[in-house]
Amino acid sequence: MWTETNNQLYRKFEFNNFSEAFAFMTRVAIEAEKANHHPLWSNVWNKVEIWLSTHDAGNIVTEKDRQLARAIDQLLK
């Protein structure tokens, strides 16, 4: 579940191993490129953390962030 805090949408994802986490990041990268909206993210072994905000709007959460969050959620189905 995404949480909104400090003008960012945040979610932590956990996978079975590094390969699954990295594959997920690759799919997220493709969606981010399509949307021309790129996340701040971190990966350590099987965990991926993503923070979304719109820099052009003053580093706040906008509909662009919500749309990318929904697209990312769809990758888990």
Image (cartoon, rainbow, N blue to C red):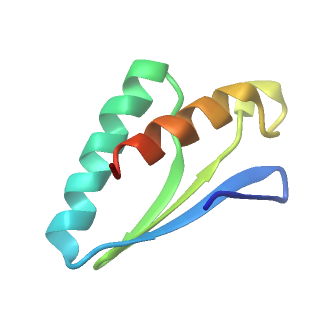
Say if 52 sits above or below 38 in the image.
Answer: below
Task: Identify the image quadrant of the N terminus.
Answer: bottom right
Say if 59 sits above or below 11 in the image.
Answer: above
Residue 28 lies, in percent from the top left, at: 36, 42
- Residue at 81% of width from left, 26% of height from top? 57
Residue 66 lies, in percent from the top left, at: 66, 36
Say if 44 sits above or below 63 in the image.
Answer: below
Residue 74 lies, in percent from the top left, at: 41, 41
Choose top left, top right, bottom left or bottom right for residue 75. top left
Residue 61 lies, in percent from the top left, at: 78, 39
- Residue at 49% of width from left, 21% of height from top? 36
Choose top left, top right, bottom left or bottom right for residue 47. bottom left
36 vs 16, left or right, is right
- Residue at 49% of width from left, 57% of height from top? 41
- Residue at 75% of width from left, 51% of height from top? 8
Q: Nearer the viewer, residue 69 or 45?
A: 69
Choose top left, top right, bottom left or bottom right for residue 64. top right
